Image (cartoon, rainbow, N blue to C red):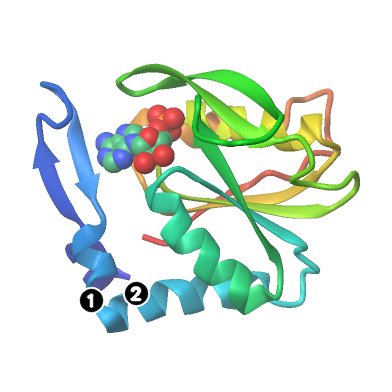
Amino acid sequence: MEDLKALIRDIPDFPKPGILFKDITTLLKDPRAFARVIDSFSQRYVGQSIEAVVSIEARGFVLGGAVAYRLGAGAIIVRKRGKLPWKTHKVTYELEYGTDELHIHQDAISPGQRVLILDDVLATGGTVSGVINLVEQLGGRVVECAFLAELLFLQGRDRLKPAPDSAARRTHPRACC
Ligand code: AMP
């Protein structure tokens, strides 16, 4: 995975001072690297009866669509305020650099569906926590959350560990590199 990691470009002070932005476009444009990433995610989840892959605006869509196709699952999109055309459920979430709203169509997931959540970067975990909330509002069962990269120093995965009193939830984070 080290060679994949080397293809992610670090951009200091974007979108504001103090943030080290992980630019995955340099990995996505490399056909072999992109294929390896999609293969890696697909191999992990094939046979796990994933019915829906939920991905997050906007870089997550590139990964989510490809993995959903490979798993024979539906591709579900979570978008920011004002982008989805039909009735939505929403959550307000915290980012490493601010707060925002995320929306999902109210009919995007059926109760009981097995869902994989996929995004490019796990930073503080605020975004994916919000997406878990949205999926659960619709009755979906989050099997796992997966990311292309994880900013370990922000300890976002700690927000995703099952609460002591809710052992049933299995939302273990998995980072590709
Ligand atoms: P967070 O909610 O803090 O885990 O942030 C994760 C979301 O914000 C993902 O959708 C990322 O695309 C984006 N993001 C946050 N921090 C960064 C970063 N340092 N580099 C690239 N993307 C980031």
Asked which secondary structure carries label 2, the reply is helix
Within 10 Å of disc 2 (Cα), the crowding (few <14, some 14-19, many 20+) is some
Q: Which residue is mark 1?
A: 30
Provide the secondary structure element on which disc 1 rests. Answer: loop
Q: Amino acid at mark 1?
A: Asp
Q: Are marks 1 and 2 in contact (CB under 8 Å)?
A: yes
Measured along the vertical axis of the image, is residue 95 above or below residue 171? above
The one nearer the camera, 61 or 1, is 61
Count neighbours of disc 1 (C-alpha within 10 A) and say few if under 14, some if 14 to 19, many if 20 or more: few
Q: Which mark is residue 16?
A: none
Residue at horizontal 41 percent and vertical 72 percent from the top: 37
Residue 1, horizontal then vertical, whole percent = 33, 70
Residue at the image point whose x is 45% and y is 43% from the top: 57
Asked if the residue at label 2 sits under 8 Å from ligand 1, the reply is no
- In front: 47, or 71? 71
Residue linked to disc 2: 34
Give the image location of residue 93, x and y in percent: 51, 20
